[in-house]
Image: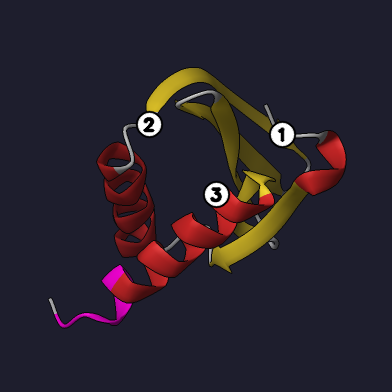
């Protein structure tokens, strides 16, 4: 298990980008991710959706927040790997 001080958060892009969301979900599935918890909330003009995904013994949290973007948080090495895989997927011509 990862120590809390080894966690990292990366904003992958705009929260409204449906292509980005699809790419993130594909990457998580490719890594063997299984969703464990989903939450949604709204406060004023901001909407927040969170999804916890288990990958092996680790857990990452996807968060889509208005004005902030789509972010992934979890163990630094895993977050870096997810970020690199999503970037590579997004730069490919569809």
Q: Where, quadrant-wise, is the C terminus in this rendering?
A: bottom left
* Residue extending farthest front: 1
- Total label count? 3
Q: Nearer the viewer, residue 24 or 33?
A: 33
Against 12, residue 28 (above or below) is: above
Determine whether, in the image, residue 88 is placed left or right of residue 69: left
Q: Which of marks 2 and 3 is in front?
A: 3
- Distance, label 1 to label 2, CA atoms, is 17 Å
13 left or right, relative to 87: right
Judge left or right: residue 34 versus residue 72: left
Q: Quadrant of residue 59?
A: top right
Q: Which of marks 1 and 2 is in front?
A: 1
How far apart in space, not on screen, are marks 2 and 3 (Cα)? Answer: 12 Å
Label 2 neighbour load within 10 Å: few <14, some 14-19, many 20+: some
| Residue shown at the point (27%, 48%) measured from the top left | 26
Q: Is residue 4 above or below residue 40?
A: below
Which residue lies at the image location 80% right of the left edge and 34% below the top edge? 3
Looking at the rendering, the stretch of residues picked out in magenta corresponds to 89-93
Q: Label 1: which residue?
A: 2
Residue corresponding to mark 2: 33
Q: Where is residue 14 in the image (x, y as percent from the top left)?
A: 53, 66
Query: Tag 2, which secondary structure?
Result: loop
Pointer 3: what residue? 78
């Amino acid at each position: 298990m990862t120590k809390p001080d080894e966690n990292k958060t990366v904003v992958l892009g705009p929260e409204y980008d449906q292509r980005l969301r699809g790419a993130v979900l594909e990457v998580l599935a490719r890594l063997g991710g299984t969703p464990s918890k989903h939450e949604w909330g709204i406060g004023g003009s901001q909407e927040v959706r969170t999804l916890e995904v288990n990958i092996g013994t680790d857990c990452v949290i996807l968060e889509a927040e208005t004005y902030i973007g789509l972010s992934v948080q979890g163990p630094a090495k895993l977050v870096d790997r997810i970020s690199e895989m999503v970037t590579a997927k997004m730069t490919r011509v569809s």
